[in-house]
Amino acid sequence: MSQNIPVAILCGGKGTRMKEETEFRPKPMVMVGDRPMIWHIMKTYAHYGFKDFMLCLGYKGDMIRDYFFNYDWNHSDVMIELGGKKITKLQSSHDEEDWRIWLIDTGQETMTGGRLKRLAAYLDQNGNEFFVGTYGDGVANVNIKDLVAFHHSHGKLATITAVRPPSRFGELVIENNLVSNFKEKPQVSEGWINGGYFVLHRKVLDLIENDDTIFEAEPLKILSEKGELAVYHHSEFWQCMDTYRELELLNQMHDRHQAPWQVWQ
């Protein structure tokens, strides 16, 4: 089911709420542990067999290009013959050798809908009627195969994943004026938000007018009004990386080996 189904990842935003990091690099290249955020996202999809990636580049997209252009040499044993300028990859390899990555410039100021629209020609070459995708600044333990199976089960044009956002503050459970339980940034028990991780039919791109179209605005509104927007509920782990504090939280989880999104381990 997952073979050659493309994964679109929105990587072009400026990440203005994380200027401590994004002044120097695009948000998908911010490090979580010893790998950039984009790698963690792609590893999740690859775990479920989705290994064709279309990266929608924009702000500082050259850094993402350089990372993947040099990936083999930076993560494999190689032999360099200086005089002949020959590089030979040795026997050892990494787990990402079967990934295929489209590095697509979708513009510096393009909105999310416009970035997806610019993938149209490449999606047509691929030949699939639908594709999956997400944003380049958040991680989750969404079961991608189950998400795609759900999408096929209802026959609608689009599916988005609903998640319960983490609370901004620690949750206190109080009994008889004493704290009986404290949870640091738990998932809230009520309310759902768009967590990304979408499945879209190729026809959805026809609802996107131009580079200025925000995908989360008019296209999703039209789909919902037509009864063509289904929701996949994911009540387990999800965490965006909008602020420096959220980056620190993800790094703490990684360092403690308590990172729920690392389903490939």
Image (tube, rainbow, N blue to C red):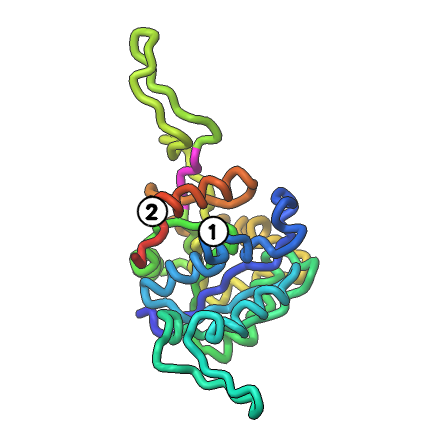
Q: Which residue is mark 1?
A: 32
The answer for how far apart the CA atoms under marks 2 and 1 are is: 12 Å
**In the rendering, at what x and y percent does residue 14 appear?**
65, 52
Q: Residues within 10 Å of mark 1 (few under 14, many from 20)?
A: many
Q: Is residue 263 magenta?
A: no
Q: What is the number of the mark on residue 263?
A: none
Measuring 57% from the left and 90% from the top, which residue is drawn there? Answer: 83
Pick the front one: 7 or 264: 264
Above or below, comparing residue 72 to residue 146 in the picture: below
Q: Is residue 227 visible?
A: no
Q: Are marks 2 and 1 in contact (CB under 8 Å)?
A: no
Measuring 42% from the left and 34% from the top, which residue is drawn there? Answer: 191
Pick the front one: 105 or 219: 105
Q: What is the number of the mark on residue 257?
A: 2
Q: Which segment did they paint magenta?
A: 162-166
Q: Which amino acid type is shown beneath numbered disc 1?
A: Val
Q: Secondary structure at mark 1?
A: strand
Pick the front one: 134 or 237: 237
Q: How many marks?
A: 2
The part of the image, by quadrant, that contains residue 253 is top left
Q: Is residue 91 left or right of residue 221?
A: left
**In the rendering, at what x and y percent does residue 97 appear?**
39, 75
Mark 2 or mark 1: which comes first in sequence? 1
